[in-house]
Amino acid sequence: MKLKLHVNGAKHTVEVAPMKRLLDTLREDLALTGTKEGCGEGECGACTVLIDGAAVNACLVPTCQVEGAEVRTVEGLASDGRLHRLQRAFLDNGAAQCGICTPGMMMAALALPKKSSLEQIRAGLAGNLCRCTGYMKIYDAVAQFLAGEKR
Amino acid sequence: MIAAADLTVQRPRTLKQALQLLRDASAENQPLTPMAGGTDLFVTLNMGQRPSARYLDLWAIEKLRGVEATGKRGLVFGALATYTDCIESKAVHKRLPILVDAARQVGGVQIQNRGTLAGNIENGSPAADGVPVLMAADATVVLRSIDGERRVPLAAYYHGYRKTERRADELIVAVEVEVPDGTQRFDKVGTRAAQAISKVVMAAVGHRLAFGSVAPTVVRARALEAYVEAGGRDVAEAQRLALEDARPIDDVRSTAEYRRRVVANLVAAWLGGLDKPPRTR
């Protein structure tokens, strides 16, 4: 089935099975491999992308359901070779180690309200698991990013 | 990867189209499986199982979205009302705050954004966190077919493990709650607060009490409710009566023995707070 998708501000028409997972369509049909597969159960958040600004697990979304919606992936962060401020904050704070959770972690962070407290950051990222860096550096990075957003 | 090419999906734009598709498919004995946010379905598919090859995607039916407040204590949840909708609804905060508690623990934000109450009900998992809350609040499931509507109390909706009252040509179009008076309480006991499927869930509204993860379906604790209704307050007796309805088993998440202990402890805690004034927010 031909589906029209809107990803990172660009329009695409893909020929995919309607029940193909958004995760697979992004990675295989659009070559956007920044979005990772972790658990496949909606628990680890590695595949987090934004649909109309809301964080979702791309491993649990059929591609047909995002027709007409705005999808944003980690590839949509940097522009013209310049890092997004959130990516810069992750670098500055040493908030990535193996990197598998990082794209999902950043996409979930982008969906947080601008004035999130530490508690809200923790709750907002509860659906994203990190197995190496630990969470404190990630929270620090997100807090630094959000602090900049307030200005 | 899932074998998506083997799965068909119909994508109606209106409720009427959806109901007609359900009717036609069921008349041909090729029933369609309704799909909302996909959070349960795709976990199953990702595990290599295929509960059905034919799906009915409801996600585009705008009419089924949202939460509405009715009258002084009513709430109507559309079939596509998500856990995030519950968390963001002022009326839910005010009238059924324990549903907000449950919604916040149902999974990460990603799951809250896509998981629906109606999907949680229809999927029939005994471990569903939102269902005990709705059952303790005497919720009614509104089923509609092309011929008309019927209302079934949620407490009578399950016939067994993942077996529900819904006929193949029917759809849950809404869940209605007229929130009863009384203290509300929600307890989820699991490995961690978010992201973990429950070992035991207890939800209470006044004298109404429901448990998750302790039987083949979410259950009401009828024997205990009758005892408390009649003025009974003995803790040991209450615990004994709770375990008439809560009959846990050993499984991957916990043991029957541990769950019985947790049920007993939760009942004691609930009983202790029962005659105190309801909490306010």
Image (tube, coloured by chain):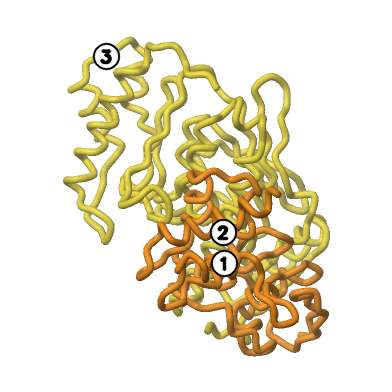
Chain colours: A orange, B yellow
Q: From the viewer's perspective, tell me whether residue A36 is left or right of residue A74.
A: left
Residue B130 is at least partly visible in this image? no
Q: The residue marked by circle 2 belongs to what chain?
A: B
Q: Residue visible at 45% across and 79% down?
A: B48
Amino acid under disc 3? Arg
Whether A74 is drawn above or below B223: the answer is: below
Mark 1 packing: few (<14 Cα in 10 Å), some, or many (20+)?
many
Q: The residue marked by circle 1 belongs to what chain?
A: A
Badge nearest the viewer, 1 or 3: 1
Q: CA distance from mark 1 to mark 2?
A: 6 Å
Residue where numbered disc 3 is placed: B233
Residue where numbered disc 1 is placed: A57
Q: How many marks?
A: 3
- SS at mark 3 in the image: loop
Asked whether the residues under the numbered discs 1 and 2 touch, taking CB atoms below 8 Å apart as contact, a structural biologist would say yes
Q: x%, y% of residue A20?
A: 63, 80
Q: Residue visible at 76% across and 46% down?
A: B148
Q: x%, y% of residue A16?
A: 70, 86
Q: CA distance from mark 1 to mark 3?
A: 46 Å
Residue where numbered disc 2 is placed: B110
